[in-house]
Amino acid sequence: MSTALYFPNIKKPDFPLEESYVDSVIRTAFENGIQQSRTKFTRRPKQWPSIHWERMTDSDHTSLMDFFNGVTDGGSLAFNWTHPYTGNVKEVTFQAPPKEKLTQPNCWEVEISIREV
């Protein structure tokens, strides 16, 4: 049995914190203008397509990148993430590698995208 992975304890992200549901509907348009739709799946997972930090320290940046590259094996493994404002825990995966930009010494601008599994 594998051990649960947990997102690192770093500074809370900046606002706005964008979140939405994954589109779970298949839509088919017909030539006569009618559209037919049905659900792809019954569960409606949430996604956070843009979680960002405008002023992340070197220490937090190192923690996040070590977590992404090492602990989650480049984003391939699911982990537990605690919503920074509601406190709800969700099992999620990275949707893409973190976007990172060094804006000045000891100050990183970072953005991640995660999705509920």
Image: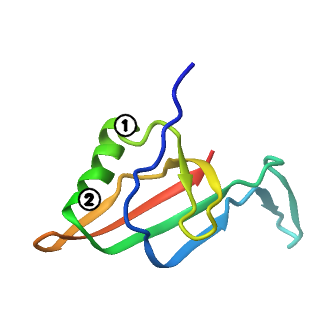
Tell me residue 84's x, y (percent): 53, 66
Q: Residue under label 1, please give it.
A: 71
Point 40% across, 51% down: residue: 8
Point 57% across, 62% down: residue: 83
82 in relation to 35, above or below:
above
Task: Report helix, strand or loop for mark 1.
Answer: helix
Of the 4 image quadrants, the one containing the N terminus is: top right
Tell me residue 95's x, y (percent): 48, 52
Crowdedness of circle 1 by 10 Å Cα count: few (<14), some, many (20+)? some
Q: Please name the amino acid that badge 1 sits on.
A: Val
Q: Is residue 111 left or right of residue 35?
A: left
Crowdedness of circle 2 by 10 Å Cα count: few (<14), some, many (20+)? many
Q: Is residue 113 left or right of residue 67?
A: right
Q: Residue furthest top?
A: 1
Q: Residue furthest bottom?
A: 16
Q: Is residue 4 left or right of residue 112?
A: right
Q: Please name the amino acid that badge 2 sits on.
A: His
Point 80% across, 46% down: residue: 41
Q: Residue under label 2, please give it.
A: 61
Front residue of 35/70: it is 70
Point 83% across, 64% down: residue: 30
Tell me residue 40's x, y (percent): 79, 48
Q: Is residue 5 left or right of residue 25?
A: left
Look at the numbered discs 1 and 2 and tell me whether their residues touch, using CB distance below 8 Å.
no
Front residue of 29/92: it is 92
Front residue of 42/62: it is 62
Disc on the earlier residue, 1 or 2:
2
Task: Report helix, strand or loop for mark 2.
Answer: helix
Q: How far separated are the C-alphas under marks 1 and 2?
A: 14 Å
56 in relation to 8, above or below:
below
Of the 4 image quadrants, the one containing the C terminus is: top right
